[in-house]
Image: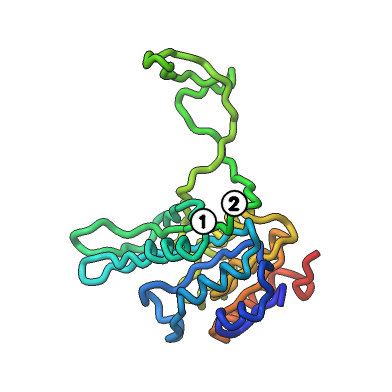
Amino acid sequence: MVNEIVCGNCIEVMEAMEADSVDLVVTSPPYDNLRTYKGYDFDFEGIAQELLRVIKPGGVVVWVVGDATIKGTETGSSFRQALHFKEIGFNLHDTMIYHKDNPPPVGGSNRYYQSFEYMFILSKGKPKTFNPIVVPRRNKWNDKRTKRFRAVVREADGTFTKKEVHVKEEVKKQNLWKYVVSGGSSAQDKIAYKHPAIFPEKLAEDHILSWSNEGDVVLDPMCGSGTTCKMSVLNKRKFIGIDISEEYCEIARERLSETVDSEWDIK
């Protein structure tokens, strides 16, 4: 099943997988009926239970989800799902934000436009892998010539002291990640846009690099157009993609066939 796109009900497919066999899950499930997805529904609690079974100890599930606003109130489905994951045994390791830069306007006349989704980082025990993404330090007090940082430090007795400390030129990225989503920026291959709701390739790649290592198995149980699978291949991970729609599976297979030369033989 490794390095395959499997068409079928993801619960039934995962039931056939060995326990503790997946290093990382990166997925964005349909939520609150914001998309029809060919009329398919999904059993959230059943999926969550199977994810807990197939993920390795120390493995991570990245669950990208948002909420609809119905009759003037947000559904809160995302929070209920996060709490359910905790109830069945996952750790809620981090609550990250996927900020959509320049999204189409969504929202009513009496509320701000919606521009983000949650990225719940769920782990089975303590995460066994964390490869933090680093970015250049940005601070007006950073003296680039001396590599020192002018800071006001509060001492134990409550007084404040001006100090200079050494600084690193790069720092760990914060947990609000911004991606451009308009103008065909989410994916490089046009066929991906045959799916109604793709997420940015860079989002999938950043999580794959953060929570897994080369050779690890990455699962997307609702893989849609195959973004997680494609970025796994490009970053030397093995993948398993599952989707109930044969049409979406074919889109994913076509994207992968254009990405790699061999039959997804990842060493």
* Neighbour tally class for label 1: few under 14, some 14-19, many 20 plus, Cα within 10 Å: many
Q: Quadrant of the C terminus?
A: bottom right
Please indicate whether residue 38 sits to the left or right of residue 125 in the image. Answer: left
Q: Quadrant of the N terminus?
A: bottom right
Please indicate whether residue 8 sits to the left or right of residue 76 in the image. Answer: right
At x 39%, y 64%, the residue is 78
Q: Amino acid at mark 1?
A: Asn
Asked if residue 170 is positioned above or below residue 241 in the image, the reply reads: above
* Neighbour tally class for label 2: few under 14, some 14-19, many 20 plus, Cα within 10 Å: some
At x 66%, y 66%, the residue is 22
Q: In the image, which disc is placed on residue 126?
A: 2
Q: In the image, which disc is placed on residue 91?
A: 1
Residue 161 point in image, percent of width and height: 43, 13
* Residue contact between numbered discs 2 and 1, judged by CB atoms under 8 Å: yes
At x 59%, y 29%, the residue is 168
At x 71%, y 66%, the residue is 238
Q: Amino acid at mark 2?
A: Lys
Residue 249 point in image, percent of width and height: 60, 81
Quadrant of the rendered image containing residue 145? top right
Q: In the image, which disc is placed on residue 177?
A: none
Asked if residue 242 is positioned above or below residue 89 in the image, the reply reads: below
Give the Cα distance between marks 2 and 1: 8 Å
Say if residue 255 shows up in the picture.
yes
| Dot placed on the residue nearer the N-terminal end, 2 or 1 | 1
Asked if residue 97 is positioned above or below residue 73 in the image, the reply reads: above
Please indicate whether residue 52 sits to the left or right of residue 71 in the image. Answer: right
